[in-house]
């Protein structure tokens, strides 16, 4: 065999590289290269046109010590993530449990609940601006039926972020489908065995369903955490071209970075901001990965 | 009447038996369970129906508002049902801003992005799934790792890059990257390629086919369902893309629907009837796409979760 086999293998390798070459080029040009440039430029006063002088750690120091808007934007983002991630996760699990049953019309219901998840962009944000409008919107109308005097939502600094979280909950159907697929993969034998032992619906849900879907919960939490920190468009559109909402209550991290980079052209400063975000997201992901073995249940044979 | 009492008795006895335990074979107990189950089904059905109404109500509100006169929109309390159905609102909205132009622009970008994504990701995924080569696992790990990089970290230096290339105010920054693959799609298609038996590819190689031929003639056709998923997700992503066009397009003639809608909002302020009509116009293609290709949306999610 020897030689011929080896040349075959080498030929295969060359094909392999050719096939993944587009990705390698793209990775170098659009990811790795920009990352290197951004890291270097975060230590300069780069403004895209005239200047690029090394300023050491000034950008970072300035952010932490002199820029109160930086802290505002970080706080807003943490607030949003801290509420939206648990709420959407719990909501999606609850919904998929409801939809994982033999009920007439279940397929129709699944389609219905998934629909909002595919809708995004300015159209949806504008719809919610109208729904949450204190005078003419639907939400306060419905609340008034129950005798509740609805808040001013997007006009009240205390309610702007809850407004966005509320909107996120509407499209919880996306991760619902993830959980549903995973729940349908749980072996019926487990439930039957539990029933023989006299377990009720709640016990079965908490002691079988939840442990069995923990890998998907983990995936969902990690990705929505990363996504949550990057909230931008919603805030940009819903606060009139990125003004940041009343009392800067919608000035999220990325929105502030955007302003620094593309309104003020403080590119070096903005890139320093982006690295701080990177580090935060990276550490949260690492913590997630470290904590995973404590609660994520992987079955021996499952991939 | 008699019958009901009898039934209640039955249930009672079943409950007692249950509390004693070991009554699994008892038929009355089974019946009790059946009733309970039906009861739960009814409760669940109603919960889902109410939830479904809640989910749908924003969309109905959008339709309803878009058909009202401004006076009716402002009247208190607002109503779910428009008094007069002013379909002419749509015509006026369409004429109030260059929506035709926006649509053509959006379609141009979207089609290019879909083509780029389908071709490049399928090609790359084939390499990762079906050809053995040195360093493959490391490269694939890097592919997956790129999914964790926050978009804004690369967004600003990418802008600098495209500015240096004189690509600002062109569509290049919006569609060229699509031709170089993206982590999520590579992952999705690779999962699907893994299910194709290697023997099939070996057999083709025996016949003298090379990998390009095999990818084109066997790989692409066999992965059609996954490609459909990638195409639909890409369509959706490009159609709804706001950040890219906002950053790279300054010339009004180049605006996409998303940017156009945002500008429209700036002009109309709170003329909700026209704004909702505009929103619906922009959302409608996605809604239609969803109902026609539901299967592929759901399949994408399943592939993502690593199942099926």
Image (cartoon, rainbow, N blue to C red):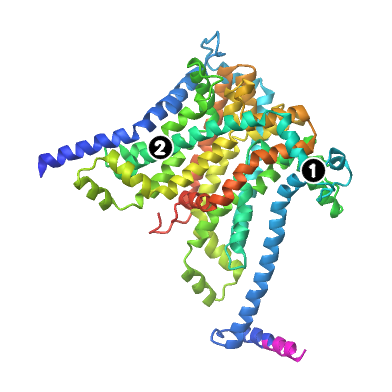
Name the image quarter holding the C terminus of chain A: bottom left
Same chain letter for marks 2 and 1: yes
Relative to the observer, which residue lies in front, B67 or A21?
Answer: B67
**Residue for badge 1:** B86
Q: Is residue A100 above or below residue B233?
A: below
Mark-to-mark CA distance, 2 and 1: 44 Å
Residue A54 position, x and y percent, is 51, 11
**Residue for badge 2:** B119
Name the image quarter holding the N terminus of chain A: top left
Q: Chain of mark 1?
A: B
Q: In the image, B247: left or right of A79?
A: left
In the rendered structure, which segment of residues is drawn in magenta? B1-10
Q: Is residue B184 above or below residue B19?
A: above
Tag 1 or tag 2, which sits nearer the N-term? 1
Q: Chain of mark 2?
A: B
Q: Is residue A243 above or below residue A95?
A: above
Relative to the observer, which residue lies in front, B80 or A240?
Answer: B80
> Quick one: SS at disc 1?
loop
Query: Is label 2 or label 1 in front?
Result: 1
Residue B259 magenta-drawn?
no
Residue B274 position, x and y percent, is 76, 36
> Quick one: SS at disc 2?
helix
* 10 Å crowding of disc 1: few (<14), some (14-19), many (20+): some
């Amino acid at each position: 065999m020897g030689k011929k086999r080896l040349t075959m293998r080498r030929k295969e390798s060359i094909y392999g590289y050719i096939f993944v070459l587009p990705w390698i080029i793209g990775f170098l040009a659009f990811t790795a290269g920009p990352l290197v440039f951004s890291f270097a430029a975060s230590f300069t006063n780069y403004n895209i046109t005239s200047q690029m002088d090394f300023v050491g750690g000034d950008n970072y120091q300035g952010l932490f010590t002199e820029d109160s808007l930086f802290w505002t934007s970080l706080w807003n983002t943490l607030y949003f993530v801290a509420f939206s991630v648990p709420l959407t996760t719990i909501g999606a699990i609850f919904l998929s449990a409801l939809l994982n049953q033999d009920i007439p019309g279940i397929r129709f219901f699944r389609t219905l609940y998934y629909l909002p998840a595919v809708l995004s962009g300015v159209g949806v944000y504008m719809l919610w601006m109208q729904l949450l409008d204190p005078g003419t919107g639907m939400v306060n109308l419905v609340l008034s039926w129950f005798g509740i005097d609805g808040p001013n939502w997007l006009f009240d600094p205390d309610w702007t972020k809850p407004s966005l979280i509320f909107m996120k909950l509407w499209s919880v159907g996306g991760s619902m489908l993830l959980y549903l697929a995973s729940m349908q993969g749980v072996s019926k034998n487990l439930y039957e065995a539990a029933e023989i032992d006299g377990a009720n619906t709640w016990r079965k849900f908490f002691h079988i369903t939840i442990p069995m879907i923990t890998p998907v919960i983990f995936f969902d939490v990690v990705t929505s955490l990363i996504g949550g920190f990057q909230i931008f468009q919603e805030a940009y559109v819903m606060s009139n071209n990125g003004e940041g909402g009343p009392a800067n209550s919608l000035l999220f991290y990325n929105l502030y970075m955007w302003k620094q980079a593309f309104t003020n052209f403080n590119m070096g400063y903005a890139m320093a901001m982006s690295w701080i975000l990177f580090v935060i997201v990276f550490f949260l992901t690492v913590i997630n990965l470290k904590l995973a073995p404590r609660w994520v249940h992987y079955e021996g044979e499952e991939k | 009447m008699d019958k009901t009492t009898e039934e209640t008795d039955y249930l009672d006895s079943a409950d007692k038996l249950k509390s004693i335990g070991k009554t699994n074979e008892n038929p009355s107990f089974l019946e009790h369970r059946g009733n309970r189950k039906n009861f739960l089904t009814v409760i669940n059905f109603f919960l889902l129906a109410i939830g479904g109404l809640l989910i749908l109500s924003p969309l109905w509100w959008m339709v309803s508002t878009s058909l009202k006169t401004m006076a009716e929109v402002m009247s208190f309390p607002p109503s779910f049902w428009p008094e007069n159905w002013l379909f002419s609102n749509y015509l006026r909205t369409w004429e109030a801003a260059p929506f035709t132009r926006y649509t053509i622009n959006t379609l141009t970008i979207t089609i290019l992005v879909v083509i780029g994504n389908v071709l490049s990701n399928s090609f790359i995924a084939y390499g990762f799934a079906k050809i053995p080569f040195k360093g493959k696992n490391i490269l694939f790990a890097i592919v997956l790792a790129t999914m964790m990089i926050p978009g804004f970290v690369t967004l600003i230096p990418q802008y600098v890059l495209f500015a240096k290339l004189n690509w600002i105010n062109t569509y290049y920054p919006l569609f060229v990257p699509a031709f170089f693959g993206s982590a999520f799609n590579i992952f999705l298609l690779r999962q699907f390629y893994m299910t194709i038996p290697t023997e099939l590819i070996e057999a083709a190689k025996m016949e003298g086919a090379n990998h390009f031929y095999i990818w084109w003639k066997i790989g692409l056709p066999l992965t059609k369902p996954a490609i459909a998923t990638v195409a639909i997700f890409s369509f959706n992503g490009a159609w709804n893309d706001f950040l890219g066009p906002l950053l790279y397009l300054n010339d009004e003639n180049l605006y996409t629907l998303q940017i156009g809608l945002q500008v429209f909002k700036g002009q109309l302020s709170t003329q909700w009837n026209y704004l909702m009509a505009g929103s619906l116009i922009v959302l409608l293609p996605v809604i239609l796409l969803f109902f026609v290709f539901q299967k592929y949306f759901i399949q994408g999610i399943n592939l993502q979760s690593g199942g099926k």
